[in-house]
Image (cartoon, rainbow, N blue to C red):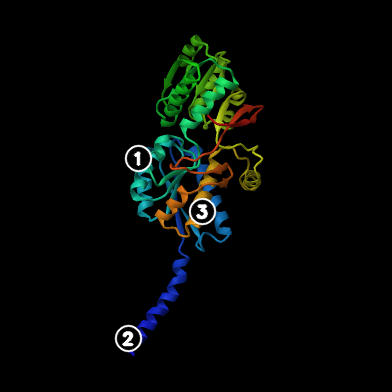
Amino acid sequence: MQASKIFALFFLALLCAAPARAADPIRVAVIASKTGDASTSNQVLFQAARYAVDEINEKGGLLGRPVEILEFDNQSTAIGSKLAAEAAEAAGVDAVIGASWSAHSLAMARVLEEAKIPMITPISTSPEVTGDRKYVFRVCYTDAYQGKVMARFAHDDLKAKTAVVLCNVDRLYSVGLADVFSASFEALGGKVLWRGEYLLDVSDFSGLLETVKTYAPDVIYLPGDYRDSSFLIGQARKMGIDTQFLGGDSFGMRLYDYIGSLAEGAYYATHWSRDSPAPQSLEFVKNYEAKFGEIKQTTIPTTYDAVMLLADAVRRAGTAEKGKVRDALAATRNFMGVTGAIAYAGTGDPEKPAIINRLENGGIRFIREASP
């Protein structure tokens, strides 16, 4: 009799505890920069992730559980990113969104791959980030992809025969793009006349640009960050260099913030266009801008897609168990995101087109979708 009473009480305790366990939150770490050099551009990553999670929770969460965000500041450094990833692991998170800069994501990826925690970077484009890893994914394309896209655009659309490449050697992102563009442009029959290199904290590019003048290229490929690219383009225009500038996905409306109309005419590859006619994109623009104002960074829609892709994988897996969520992510074939359809085929890199935009009349003009 006593044993049966104990069993009954134990069974009752289990019944009472089950709803509490079912309501335990699914914990998602968001790692990016709140302090340091990258913080200016990274703040919107946190904002977009919160927005996406709020939307999920307003619709009942995932598998009957709320989603909770844990935010970690990587302090704009690789070591800070490693420490943030270790802190996220220690906190027992189910997945990680981040980071922005490729060097930061690479430091995180090494930790999270070993810990077998799914990671999705919204905007890090270096091929090394995903590499041969099983738990690391991205929703953006890679440097190799966009470098090839811009090389073909320069050769086929702009009819460029010669180019100068200017590379920020302190940024993994810039070096990777410079390498791929150069190799791809020359494979198409173009000629890279010179590769100029500069450091992250430089603000006077006059010496570099005097050398560019002597080569008189058809195009200048500048895969820098928005800040150094702005200063470099601005100085070039003031020195009378009217050569066509081409850039990577770090370009955008922010160039106007630094140099105003001197940014006009620059072409760049990016992950999304505000002018996209896709229903998912139109709805996102309407709702997000009603709350936060004009979307000026592609990090916003790519972060939203990263969170929603994770949510989709959890639903398809039927669990937040890390290994099964990883398998569901890898099996993604036609996820319709704000930035387009996302599919994976054996790697953590999505199959999706790039967008080519042009800075024009104080805004952004959509040119076309492109592939290598």
Mark 2 surroundings within 10 Å by alpha-carbon count, few (fewer than 14), some (14 through 19), many (20 or more): few
Against 66, residue 355 (above or below) is above
Q: Earlier in the sequence, mark 3 or mark 2?
A: 2
Mark 3, Cα crowd under 10 Å, few <14 / some 14-19 / many 20+, is many
The residue drawn where x is 46% and y is 28% is 177
Mark 2: which secondary structure? Answer: helix
Q: Gap in Å between the C-alphas at discs 2 and 1?
A: 56 Å
Q: Which residue is mark 1?
A: 79
Q: Which mark is residue 3?
A: 2
Corner quadrant of residue 195: top left
Residue 215 sits above or below residue 329 on the image: above
The answer to whether the residue labelled 2 contacts the one labelled 1, judged by CB atoms less than 8 Å apart, is no
In the image, residue 340 lies at what x, y percent?
58, 42
Task: Give the Cα distance between marks 3 and 2.
Answer: 44 Å
Amino acid type of the residue that numbered disc 2 sits on in the rendered structure: Ala
Callout 1 environment at 10 Å: few (<14), some (14 to 19), or many (20+)? some
Residue 338, image quadrant: top right
Which type of secondary structure does the marked residue at label 1 adopt? helix
Q: Position of residue 122 (x, y in %)?
A: 49, 42
Amino acid type assigned to the residue bearing label 1 in the image: Ile
CB under 8 Å between callouts 1 and 3?
no
Residue beneath label 3, please?
Answer: 311
Q: CA distance from mark 1 to mark 3?
A: 29 Å
